[in-house]
Image: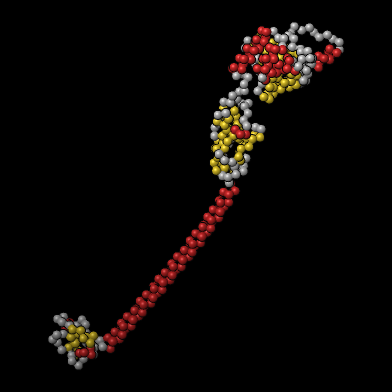
Amino acid sequence: MGLRFRKSIKIAPGVKINLNKKSTSVTFGGKGVHYTSSSTGKKTASVGIPGTGISYTQTTGQSSKQKKTNKGGSQPMPTAPQANFQDPDHKKWYQKTGWIIALLILFFPVGLFLMWKYTNWKKPIKGIITALILIIALSGIVSPDKLEQITLKADTEQTYDINQKISIEATTTPSDYELSSSDFKCSGGKITTNNQNISFIATKDGSYKIWAEHDGIKSNKLTVKVEDKAAIAKQRAKEEQKRLAEEKAQKEAEEKAAQEKAAQEAAKAQAKAEAEAQAAAQAQAQAEAQQQAQAATQAQQNNDPTVYITNTGGKYHRAGCRFLKQSQIEKHLSEVKGVYGPCGVCNPPQ
């Protein structure tokens, strides 16, 4: 068993390119009617009613392998009788089967006219083809798929920088529907499209709305936030510098206030100490003065001692004399000396 390769690529509604290991072909049409032209020269036209199993296929031309076989002298194997789609060389291009089938697919009114006028197909076949094409045309099967939904996706959680490219993913229903750059809208900034790559850029900070709209179909709206991060960083640095300056000024003010408070407390302590010292000095001076007064009094008393007399007696006495029980009058010796005589019992100073 050999390795086989086949790949079909849809390049437009109703048009596909088929790639395999040995050849390349192009297919026009869809379900019911299609026409395939191969690089080997082989051309195949097929007409059928979908879902019924009824179809008609016409193949013209030979592949390069078949041509080599014929050149070698071998006879081609007999095939079932087929309708004569081969056109004589003198026919014009629009009378040839291949062009008629292509026009049936691409522009069916002209294709139907040419089919009925120039092909030798049997009338039942022509009738089936005509009915099938009209059914397809009326049901819209051959018309391009109608756009049903547009969905936009992007990372809207983060905040972007100005001039930063923001990737946007657009999906459609049907998935192969293509949107143009004019279908994308935004409340500011700029949207660029490159094939399937969609991006948004804003040069100013702000909040932007992004959406798509085509043939009356609107997508969801994306909201992206953009900010000038360099300006914000500069502003934050400025605010931080201001904060540090304010903290430094506050610290210096607090240190100055603490120094002033310490100086005031020191001055108060010094004043208190000075007051206490002055009070102590004054107390000491008063004590010394009192002592001096007491000393002076004592000295005076030693020179002029105190004695006592009675109301009726003619003697002066010492304190505690028994004759002072009735009365005693305090006097200095100098006051009574010469007037009163000393008591002979207590023997006062003389």
Specify the quadrant of the image occupied by residue 59.
Answer: top right
Residue ranking furthest to the left: 312
Residue 234 screen position, x and y as percent = 58, 51
Q: In the rendered view, tell whether residue 84 sits above or below residue 270.
A: above
In the rendered structure, the answer to whether residue 78 lies left or right of residue 112 reads right
Quadrant housing residue 304: bottom left
Q: Nearer the viewer, residue 74 or 269?
A: 74
Q: Quadrant of the N terminus?
A: top right
- Whole-percent x and y of residue 92? 76, 16
Percent coordinates x, y for residue 170 in the rendering: 60, 31
Q: Residue 32: horizontal and vertical position, in percent? A: 65, 14
Q: Is residue 194 positioned above or below 22 on the image?
A: below
Q: Can you tell which quarter of the image residue 159 is in?
A: top right
Determine the residue positioned at 78% across, 18% down: 40
- 301 or 273, which is in the foreground? 273
337 left or right, relative to 24: left
